[in-house]
Image (cartoon, rainbow, N blue to C red):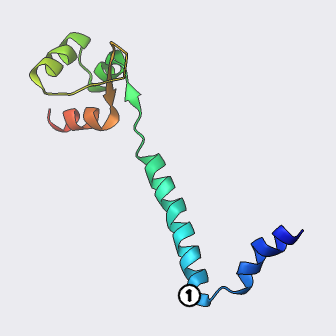
Amino acid sequence: MQNEKTNVGWLLTLTEDRLASLIESSVKKVIDEKEAAKKVERLFTTEEAAEMLRISTVTLWRWKATGRITPMRAEGSRKDLYSESEIQRALRNL
């Protein structure tokens, strides 16, 4: 019971500026976490990327070989994966 009083006791000594600072940092943390979650991009297989680009998988392979599009590869995987932003970049450069 004493521990609970100790944990709550600091609230009584909060200044207005300190409370504002605590609220601001908490809100900023939540916003940053939401922004980071938005940045997680979906990855597409070779077949999905080719379909989105309306090209064959052979053409996509050629584009990869010439640097026109750059895939990612999951650690330990042999399959190419294409990020949505990379596919959009390739579409803009058609």
Residue at the outermost front position: 2
User: Pointer 1: what residue?
Assistant: 17
Q: Quadrant of residue 5?
A: bottom right
Percent position (x, y) of residue 44? 37, 25
Label 1 secondary element:
helix
Q: Tag 1: Cα neighbours inside 10 Å, few (<14), some, or many (≥20)? A: few
**Residue 18 or 61: which is nearer the viewer?**
18
Q: Is residue 37 above or below residue 55?
A: below
Percent position (x, y) of residue 18? 57, 83
Q: Quadrant of the C terminus?
A: top left
Is residue 15 left or right of 10 when viewed as pictured? left
**Residue 20 or 81: which is nearer the viewer?**
20
Percent position (x, y) of residue 63? 15, 21
Q: Is residue 21 above or below residue 71?
A: below
Residue at the outermost left position: 66
**Identity of the amino acid at label 1?**
Asp
Is residue 62 left or right of 42 when viewed as pictured? left
Residue at the outermost bottom position: 16
**Residue 23 or 8: which is nearer the viewer?**
8
**x 37%, y 16%: residue:** 76
In this rendering, the count of numbered labels is 1
Q: Quadrant of residue 48?
A: top left
Percent position (x, y) of residue 1? 90, 68
Is residue 5 left or right of 75 when viewed as pictured? right
